[in-house]
Image (tube, grey):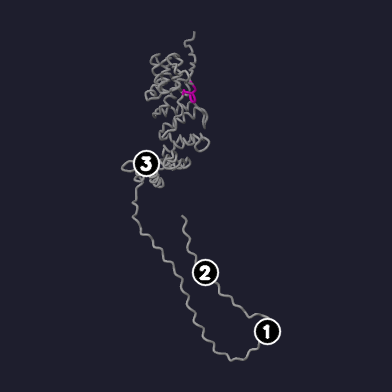
Amino acid sequence: MAEHRQLPIIALLLVLLVGGSTLAPFPSTAFVPPPLPGDEEEIAPPPPPVFDETPGVQQPPREKIEPTPEPEAPAKPKPTPKPQPKPKQKPAPGPKEPSYTLEQLFRMGMDAYKGENGKQRSFQEAMKWWTRAAAAGHSTAQYNLGIMYLNGEGTEKNYKKARDFFLQAAGKGNSNAAEQLGHLYFGDLLGAPDYKEAGRWYEKASGGNMAFAEFRLGLMHYKGLGRPKDSMKAFYWFDRAAHNGYIDAMVNLGVLYEKGDGAVFSPEKAIRWYAEAAEKGSPLGMAYLGEAYYQGRGVRRDEKKGIEFLERAASADLPYAQRKLYEIDRIKYMRYRHIQ
């Protein structure tokens, strides 16, 4: 008899990691005269024509007449000088606009955007000040203008202009702007999704510990979007996002521990992450934790506690929890019988 018996492989029947209910779905996407012509010069009229005597006509003989002295030609009048246009008077200089520091320009834009410090709320006024600050290189003003063009605040929505401002800010190391670029390329706002470019910007954003960018990188590696499928890399990014406080990443991390997919199989660690997500208000974390308690997966079986967690998730309108409750008791939870 062998000293050690080989443990059978535990097959966990979980819903697909992404696209079903097992992994948290993508969170909804949250948190911009020509010069006047001169006067033409007057043109002098042409001189009158000179007519010669008519040719071919016989002229009568003329008597010899002593020439009389030719009278002196009257002096030609001097041409009247053209009136010269009066020089335009320059308008009196108005009061000079005071010079502002970059931080003052940014702050005035923020006051106008929020309607604070005695300023009336005005997106157009905010754009005016932030445009000046952005032109002088203020990266947060550049990012804020990108958000305004993205949301259509004070201007029409213009995703290309939003991208241009995000590029300026990201070029100065602004991680928020890099993350927004990732969103633009991940979706279809600039045309067809470009997952490779999205991943490039999400990776730049991850340098600033942007948890959502890390979560998206985990999904992209798990689903093979713009890169080969790689569960271990997906686990790496979910782990980073979870430690940076992103709740959906905590749920996904728990699923990978329960499946042993990209991580060492550990139902106990899965319970830990489900519990943390549930404590932070995640209905999906509550549902997975409730199911684990009800079935005794990674924790001592406790059907009552399991149903309590499932009910909390169902009351938050989570279809997954509602379906599970209906499977447990079709009479008590008949109201969920039509949930797909």
Compared to residue 109, the image places residue 308 above or below, namely: above
State the residue lying farthest toward the left: 118
The percent coordinates of residue 16 (x first, y second) are 49, 22
The percent coordinates of residue 10 (x first, y second) are 48, 16
The residue at the point 66 percent across, 87 percent down is 60
Amino acid of disc 1:
Gln
Question: Which SS class for mark 1?
Answer: loop
Question: Mark 3 or mark 1, which is nearer the start of the sequence?
Answer: 1
Q: Dot 1 surroundings within 10 Å: few (below 14), some, or many (20 or more)? A: few
Question: Which SS class for mark 2?
Answer: loop
Residue holding disc 3:
113
Query: Is the Cβ of the residue at disc 1 closer than 8 Å to that at disc 3?
Result: no
Residue holding disc 1:
58
Question: Mark 2 or mark 3, which is nearer the start of the sequence?
Answer: 2
The residues bearing labels 2 and 1 have C-alpha atoms spaced at a distance of 42 Å
The residue at the point 49 percent across, 65 percent down is 40
The residue at the point 46 percent across, 15 percent down is 327
The percent coordinates of residue 174 (x first, y second) are 41, 39
Which dot, 3 or 2, sits closer to the camera? 2
Magenta stretch: dominant SS? loop
Asked whether 197 falls inside the magenta stretch, the response is no
What's drawn in magenta, residue-wise? 15-22
Residue 49 picture quarter: bottom right
Query: Is the Cβ of the residue at disc 3 closer than 8 Å to that at disc 2?
Result: no
The residues bearing labels 3 and 2 have C-alpha atoms spaced at a distance of 59 Å
Asked whether 20 falls inside the magenta stretch, the response is yes
Residue holding disc 2:
43
